[in-house]
Structures are given as structure tokens and as C-alpha cells.
């Protein structure tokens, strides 16, 4: 049976790819964006697509948008918290305003949409919440500290949520993509005022980034369809070979360190 999706940040990148993949197979989608005109590319799907203007940092607006989507389509099956952005800045470069803005969107935006959807999904007796995290919710890299703070927060609260709603027929999955061919590091990103102390570090990182291969968002969209169609979806799933390799190597090193320091840990 076809599903009804609610996708935040559906105007470009992953959000647009997810919405298009769902619509092309016959599902219905309520997609949100800060500006309605940025959703025009999905209007070709006619009544199967409901465009909604939304700033996810507005809690009341989140509740209203989720309610409108449910009233329009009669149900909600998949809620995708995709809206978010990356903030680049070394730790001491980040201002209070920048830090709060990053958390407002990436953490609280996802929290408010999820809170709005939970009563609906519980009443239905089914539903799947997809939290778009990142390999940055598993690992950490220089100049992305506040972004990592937002994604690690999303990971923790979503893992707790999954346990809380497991008996209500509601599933939760954290999607952890690596580098993809989206605009995440381009015009979608925010950047702090650079401190010259880190200029050399910044240049070295830019050179390494230029050597990496980005994944295909369309492939990620097809993978997401498999996740939402699964009877037993994972709590966490890595998207892309890069993310898989990074997470596997990092986990092995963490386990090795824990074992090396086991005696001290138990003494503590």
C-alpha cells in the first residue's frame, strides 16, 4: 500500500531526492520549505504532493504543519526530519548566536516535528520516524564542532525515543550519511568569522576534502525506501561507503582503547 510522507527541508538535497523517490513510486508527500516557491519542482506530481511553508524552529508552526498534512491526506506513515544545515567554524570561532541557531534548527526543529507527529502515529498504531543524522553524529572532525553537537544530540534523544515508543507501533531510524553530492557544504552551510590561527589547518582540510568522492543522493533515496519498507528497520543505518568505512574503523579503535584501559575503568 502507498505511504504518506512528511518531509522537512524538501526543496533540495536529500529532502528533494527523498520526496521525488517516494512520489515516483506512487506514495504521497507533504514537503516543507522555508519558501514555498522552492518546492515548485515537485508540483508536477499534482495532488500527490502537498507543499507547506515551514520554519522548523517555530514549534507552533511545526505542530500546525503536521496537523495539516494529516488532515489533507488522512494519515501519516513516514516522518522525515531532514531540515538542517552544517555550520563550519573552529571551536573558538563559534559565536553564541551561531551555536544557538545550529541547535535550534538541527535539534529543536527535529524535536518539535517529532513531538507533533507522535500522537498521530500512536493513534494510528503505526508510523516510522526517520531522523537524518550524519556520519558527523558518529564521528567528529575539526571545524564542525557545533554541527557535531547538534547531531550527537539528535542521536541520543532519538535512541531514547525509540525505546519509549517501541510498544506503540512506532519505529525510529537514524540515517547517518557520509559525503554526498548535495549543497550541504555549499550555499546551505554557515561559516564563522575565521581566526587566522587556524588558516593552515583550514587549507589542509580543504585539500583533503577536494580528494574525496561524493555519493549520489538518488542512491540514498532508493536506500531509504528499503528502510521504510522493512518490517524490522534498524535504529541506525550508515549511508555510503565512506560513512561505513569511517564508522567501522572508529568503532574498532574505540573498543581497542576501552580494552587497553579496562583495568583503570574498573578501578574507577
Image (cartoon, rainbow, N blue to C red):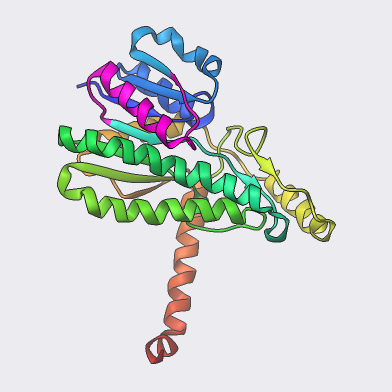
Left/right placement of residue 240 relative to residue 129 reads right
**247 in relation to 187, above or below:** below
Extreme front residue here? 60
Q: Say whether residue 66 is magenta.
A: yes
Towards the viewer: 109 or 211: 109
Taking the spot 34% from the left edge, 40% from the top edge, the residue there is: 114
Taking the spot 53% from the left edge, 29% from the top edge, the residue there is: 13
Towards the viewer: 103 or 268: 103
Q: Which residues are magenta?
A: 52-77
> What quarter of the picture does the N terminus occupy?
top left
Q: Say whether residue 62 is magenta.
A: yes
**107 in relation to 65, above or below:** below
Taking the image as drawn, is residue 133 in sight?
A: no
Taking the image as drawn, is residue 200 in sight?
A: yes
> What quarter of the picture does the C terminus occupy?
bottom left
**258 in relation to 120, above or below:** below
Taking the spot 51% from the left edge, 17% from the top edge, the residue there is: 36
Towards the viewer: 65 or 246: 65
**Which quadrant of the structure image shows residue 252?**
bottom left
**58 in relation to 21, above or below:** below
* Residue 62 locus on image (x, y percent): 40, 32
**Which quadrant of the structure image shows residue 48?**
top left
Amino acid at each position: 500500500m502507498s505511504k504518506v510522507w512528511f518531509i522537512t527541508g524538501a526543496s533540495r538535497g536529500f529532502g528533494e531526492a527523498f520526496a521525488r523517490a517516494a512520489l515516483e513510486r506512487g506514495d504521497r508527500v507533504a514537503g516543507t520549505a522555508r519558501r514555498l516557491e522552492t518546492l515548485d519542482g515537485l508540483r508536477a506530481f499534482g495532488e500527490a504532493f502537498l507543499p507547506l511553508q515551514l520554519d522548523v524552529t517555530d514549534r507552533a508552526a511545526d505542530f500546525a504543519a503536521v496537523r495539516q498534512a494529516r488532515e489533507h491526506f488522512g494519515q501519516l506513515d513516514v516522518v522525515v526530519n531532514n531540515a538542517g544545515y552544517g555550520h563550519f567554524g573552529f571551536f573558538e570561532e563559534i559565536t553564541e548566536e551561531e551555536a544557538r541557531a545550529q541547535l535550534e534548527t538541527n535539534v529543536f526543529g527535529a524535536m518539535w516535528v517529532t513531538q507533533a507527529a507522535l500522537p498521530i502515529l500512536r493513534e494510528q498504531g503505526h508510523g516510522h520516524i526517520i531522523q537524518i543524522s550524519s556520519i558527523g553524529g558518529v564521528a567528529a572532525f575539526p571545524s564542525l564542532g557545533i554541527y557535531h553537537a547538534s547531531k550527537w544530540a539528535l542521536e541520543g534523544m532519538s535512541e531514547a525515543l525509540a525505546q519509549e515508543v517501541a510498544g506503540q507501533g512506532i519505529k525510529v531510524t537514524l540515517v547517518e550519511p557520509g559525503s554526498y553530492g548535495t549543497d550541504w557544504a555549499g550555499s546551505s552551510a554557515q561559516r564563522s568569522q575565521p581566526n587566522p590561527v587556524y588558516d593552515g589547518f583550514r587549507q589542509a582540510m580543504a585539500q583533503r576534502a577536494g580528494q574525496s568522492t561524493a555519493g549520489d543522493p538518488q542512491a540514498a533515496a532508493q536506500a531509504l525506501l528499503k528502510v521504510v519498507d522493512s518490517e524490522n528497520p534498524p535504529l541506525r543505518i550508515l549511508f555510503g561507503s565512506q560513512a561505513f568505512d569511517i564508522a567501522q574503523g572508529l568503532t574498532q579503535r574505540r573498543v581497542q582503547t576501552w580494552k587497553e584501559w579496562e583495568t583503570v575503568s574498573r578501578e574507577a
